[in-house]
Image (cartoon, rainbow, N blue to C red):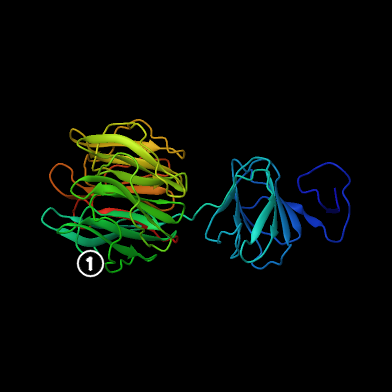
Amino acid sequence: MSGTIVDNLTRTSGTIAPTSGGLSWSSDVITASTATVEGGNGYWINTTSNACTVTLPSSAEIGDKIVLADYARTWATNNLIIDSNGLNFQGSPDTYTVDYSTAGQSISIIYSDSTKGWIPISDDAVTDAPVAPVTQKAIVGYGTTGSGVSSMTNLVSSSGVVASDVTGVGTDRMKPGAASYGYDKALFAYGYAAAVTSLKNLVNNLGVVAADVTGVGTARESPAAATYGGDKAIFGYGSTGSNVSMTNLVNNSGVVAADVSGVGTARSYLAAAEYGTDKALFGYGYTSSAVSLTNLVSNTGVVAADVSGVGTARNALAAATYGTDKAIFGYGIASGIVSLTNLVNNLGVVAADVTGVGSARNALTATNYGGDKAIFGFGVPSGGASAITNLVSSSGVVATDTAGVGTARYYPAAAGFSNSA
């Protein structure tokens, strides 16, 4: 059918009225992996062979309209990805990913203003929402060699390669927590120096660690930390000398808030990771013995009550996000050191034990890297401190040991930073 389609964006029946203010449909079906579109037009997007990234105009006027339609009902297999090209999309900046993945879907977007940018007025599946950009690199910092505490760091590339030691910044300490914040930065906080501390050190998107900032919240060691809400972080639990369950939220500027009364069983030596793209969970740890319970964290930073544990109870383990929306807990100490792992799906459900790969050890750390992968590193296997690492694929498969780079140590912390590979 030729002509201009007006007010028929959801394919309702009836007469299609011509008007000078209508929408012109492209006569070509787009099959390429990339395409650039213009306002006032409709486009058929065929993703049978590959996903397609559609780049919107770099400038737009109020009322500009674009319609995109799934030509072959294959967006569920190969997604449509929108690059808003410097403009906002539903109020979110261009650093977000807008991903449509429903078969047969069509979307109609109109440009509003510089604040909200492009807004869908019809998309056949309104639950699709922007997803925060993934971190590409990571940093491991602090810890103890067994003969003294340290503030040294090691950067991890977007391909999982650990770099040599960087001279430490900030107070030497072990058992801090670390998490990403602000989409591309990280922070270390809390830990044990000559005593428990609450100080923090911010890490910029180049991996440079800043000087100590006077801590907020109760000084403690062995907390866990994770990103939530896409751009914020939460530190929780730990030990002041006695186990606690309090938490501290971190905003997207890296500011740590005052203590929030704890929810769930007080414990230390636990781990935490982001899941579901905007939520987090704390898991495992030590009370008067090792436990396997978990506590989910909402995308507004609210901690839920204990969930009965799945998998072997253990402590001094590590956890990280993988596959962009799932998590993995690994290693630790039960009745002895172990190398088993437990995968967490994008709903926060912890799976049964998976037989471990790599050297059994405890007091290690883990973080995401490379957009959708994770890495476990350092810790104490039999025989003393180690710098060995184990990479985790985007499907949660743990690789064999990689010979360590950097000073062998245990009780460090790690977090992702940078959106650039």
372 or 35: which is nearer to us?
372
Across and down, in percent, residue 298 comes to 45, 45
Q: Residue reaching furthest front?
A: 261
Residue hosting label 1: 167
Across and down, in percent, residue 238 comes to 25, 48
Residue depicted at 82% across the width and 57% down the height: 22
Number of numbered discs on residues = 1
Residue 163 in sight in this render: no
Q: Secondary structure at mark 1?
A: loop
Q: Is residue 138 above or below residue 62?
A: above
For this view, does 93 lie left or right of residue 401? right
- The amino acid on which the numbered mark 1 sits, given as a three-letter code, is Thr
Q: Is residue 319 above or below residue 354?
A: below
For this view, does 417 lie left or right of residue 340? right
Residue 382 in sight in this render: yes
Across and down, in percent, residue 317 comes to 26, 42
Quadrant of the image containing the C terminus:
bottom left
Circle 1 crowding by C-alpha within 10 Å: few under 14, some 14–19, many from 20: few
- Residue 257 appears in which quarter of the rendering? bottom left
165 or 176: which is nearer to us?
176
Across and down, in percent, residue 333 comes to 21, 38
